[in-house]
Amino acid sequence: MTYTTKNLVTFITAACLCQVMALNVFAAYKAHWDKDERLAVLNEEKPDVVLVGNSMMYSNLSPKLMSELTGMKVVAIQTHGCMSAWKYLVLKNIIAAADHKPKIVVVVTRRNNATSPEYRNGKHRKSYMRAIESYRDPEEDLLDAIAYPEGSTDDGKFPSLTGEMINFNKMVDKSFVPHMLKIAKENNFHLVYAVHKTRELIDDPSCETPERKKYTRDFAGYVEKHGGTLFNYKNTSELQLKHYLQKPGDDHLNEPEGQRVWTTLMARDLEKLSSDLAARESAKTDAKALTQNKK
């Protein structure tokens, strides 16, 4: 075999391996989009807690460690990059549609993304649209009205953190937040919004303006008023610069240390919430029994 022929064989072999690797990567992402597979996981594994999010969740939290720390079965439903439109469909068409319902669903969010429904709605990147399309039902009037209003655009940039966009009370009725809380109530699971501590809060604490603080307070109040809970990690001192990937503006945590810190923090909060929910349920049962005895 000549030198040229050997090079050609090497090149063809390498090209084939690259193609196989690409197909495997695509298959992994495709699995994230498969609605039937997700339903099967919930029904077979019967989790107590389901984590929902993009890489802010699956890179930053460990379901395995969280299960070990809490004694609860924790699974994750994730995809790359998608935001509130996709998360709404996860609750509506997967979690609510499954035969098994978890006790708690945690939706990971950051900044004002929860009330910015057009952000990453798929118009900017095809992979986001494929993920959304794979979970939608044939008729999704609410999804289309909120995520794709007339004239909607998505340039892929973070939503503005000024003016009306950072006013939770003005934006909430234009978002999926009320509908996700309603889905949780109707399907008897407790919805948690977990607000991630972004790296900018460490690099420049002054960026947390009074308007941004008010947004988070109003967000928490609204969620709690409608039967859910907000876990706010923006102010935690336990997540430090050393726990983030060393790239300015990157909110991903490093593994395993950064991931371990946030997972441990959330595990504590979940344990407390689970205990509180059990106490509330017990109180309701006792009150109902007392009422029946009086009759």
Image: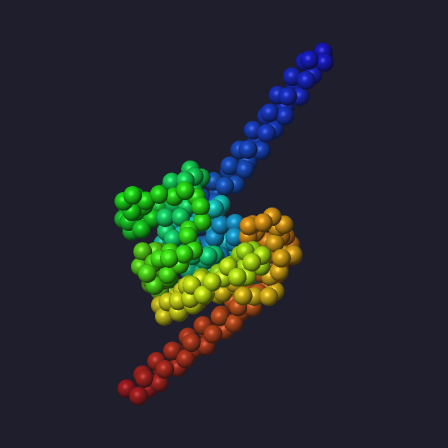
**If the image is split into quadrants, where does the C terminus sit?**
bottom left
The reply, left or right, for residue 256 in relation to residue 250 is: right
Between 13 and 258, the residue placed more toward the observer is 258
Determine the residue positioned at 64% across, 21% down. Answer: 11
> Residue sitting at 36 percent across and 70 percent down?
225
Tell me the residue at 47%/63% (across/down). 209
Q: Which of 128 and 236 is in front in this view?
A: 236
* The residue positioned farthest toward the top in the image shown: 2
Measured along the vertical axis of the image, is residue 137 above or below residue 282? above
Inspect this view and state whether residue 89 appears. no
Image x and y of residue 230, in percent: 45, 66
Q: Where is residue 2 in the image (x, y as percent from the top left)?
A: 72, 11
183 vs 17, left or right, is left
Q: Say whether residue 207 is visible.
A: yes
Colour setup of the view: rainbow
How many numbered markers are drawn? 0
Residue at image point 40% right, 59% down:
166
Residue 216 in the image: state x and y as whole percent: 44, 64
Q: Where's the N terminus, which quadrant?
A: top right
Q: Decide which of 165, 132 is in the foreground and name it.
A: 165
Position of residue 121 measured from the top left corner of the image (x, y, whole percent): 38, 45
User: As drawn, is 139 to the left or to the right of 93?
Assistant: left
